[in-house]
Amino acid sequence: MNVVSKSKIFYDFESLKPLLTIWKGSNNTIVFTNGCFDIIHHGHVDSLQKSAALGTRLIVGLNSDQSVELLKGENRPVFSEQARAEILAAFECVDAVIIFKEETPAEIIAKILPDVLVKGAEYKIHEIAGHDTVLSNGGKVEILDLVDGISTTDIIDRIKKL
């Protein structure tokens, strides 16, 4: 992994805080999105690029391995949190990746206080973790259309049938 990608990965808020302070002090628009990103596919790429276009800095909250297992089941994640973080950090449109252990990113969102919170259209606004915090602090919540016919679970199921 190259130095630039490695410098984008954070394991707690305290390590991200100095960079976030610089970004906010420079009037950047901070965008936050999150997910498991277990097997990266073109739907993920689409949502990351669209999320990044909504501001000047994109922070991706990444579910830890234990968080993914809680959400997706015993045989997930396919790739470790370190591998998933390195893949996300390699994207030019991603400015930071922060790994969180909780089931939802609500706690990390409350600390980051992004200007824009982004999730896919499979969620209603009231179902999005942290939406209330972002809205009550003057931010926006954006819901992106999903790329039809693609999901990590579907990809895994198709591979199992091979």
Image: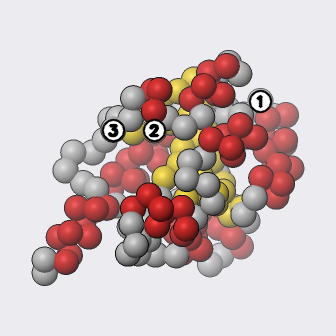
Q: Which is more foreground, mark 1 or mark 2?
A: 2
| Residue at x-position 84% and y-position 42% | 22
Is residue 102 or residue 121 the one in the foreground? 102
Inspect the image, locate mark 2, and give the three-letter code of the amino acid beneath it. Lys
Earlier along the polypeptide chain: callout 1 or callout 2? 1
Mark 1 residue type: Asn
**Residue 18 shown left or right of residue 96 in the figure:** right
- Contact (Cβ within 8 Å) of mark 3 with mark 2: yes
Q: Nearer the viewer, residue 77 or 52?
A: 77
Residue under numbered circle 2: 119
**Judging from the image, what secondary structure is the residue with disc 2 in?**
strand
* Residue 133 visible in this rendered orientation of the protein: yes
How far apart, in angstroms, are the residues tagged by discs 1 and 3?
Answer: 31 Å
Using a 10 Å C-alpha cutoff, classify the residue at mark 1 as few (fewer than 14 neighbours), some (14 to 19) or many (20 or more): few
* Earlier sequence position, callout 1 versus callout 3: 1
Q: Mark 3 = which residue?
A: 122
Label at residue 27: 1
**Extreme left residue here?**
161
- Location of residue 139 by image quarter: top right
Q: How many numbered discs sit on the rendered protein?
A: 3
The quadrant in which residue 20 appears is top right
